[in-house]
Amino acid sequence: MKMMKFAVILLLLNFVVAGCGLKDRRADKIRSQYPGWDEATVQMVTARKAVVGMTKPMVIAGLGNPDSINQEGEEEKWTYGINRDRDMGAIVRIPVFWVYFKGGKVVRTEGDWKKLGYTFYGS
């Protein structure tokens, strides 16, 4: 029984270490691709977050390309979604997170970015 507990603990520790390693490699890659970005920005992009003040390239580096881009008054709205199965196996994209830009910078976000499935990198 003790051996089984030890094996389970060892397995869980491996998952934690692997996750940290992936996040560190992602941060290193972002630092090398964008040497002008400050460390706080690198950490937010690594954690796949979009926050007020970020530029479009920062959001793309963190979240990827949006599913759609629309103009709403003076703001540009980027929509991010997730795939969901629907009747008879058809896959439908469901919007869950929105990023709003004004003057090329994020002014607000809506929705739940955690639903995008990036929580593995989250802080």
Image (cartoon, rainbow, N blue to C red):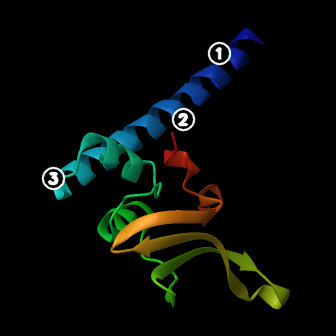
SS category of the residue bearing label 2: helix
> What's the residue type where badge 1 is placed?
Phe
**Of discs 1 and 2, which sits in the foreground?**
2
User: How far across and how far down the image is residue 31, in percent?
Assistant: 21, 49
> What's the residue type where badge 2 is placed?
Phe
Give the class, few, some or many, for how many residues have Cα within 10 Å of label 3's Cα (few <14, many ≥20). few
Q: Find the residue positioned furthest to the top.
A: 2
User: How far across and how far down the image is residue 104, in percent?
Assistant: 33, 73
Q: Which mark is residue 91?
A: none
Q: Which mark is residue 36?
A: 3
Which residue is tagged 1? 6
Labels 3 and 2: the sequence-earlier one? 2
Q: Residue at x 54, y 55 (%)?
A: 118
User: How far across and how far down the image is residue 89, in percent?
Assistant: 77, 86
User: How far across and how far down the image is residue 78, in percent?
Assistant: 50, 78
Q: Which mark is residue 15?
A: 2
Q: Residue at x 72, y 76 (%)?
A: 84
Q: Is residue 38 above or below residue 78?
A: above
Residues at discs 1 and 3 in contact (Cβ within 8 Å)? no
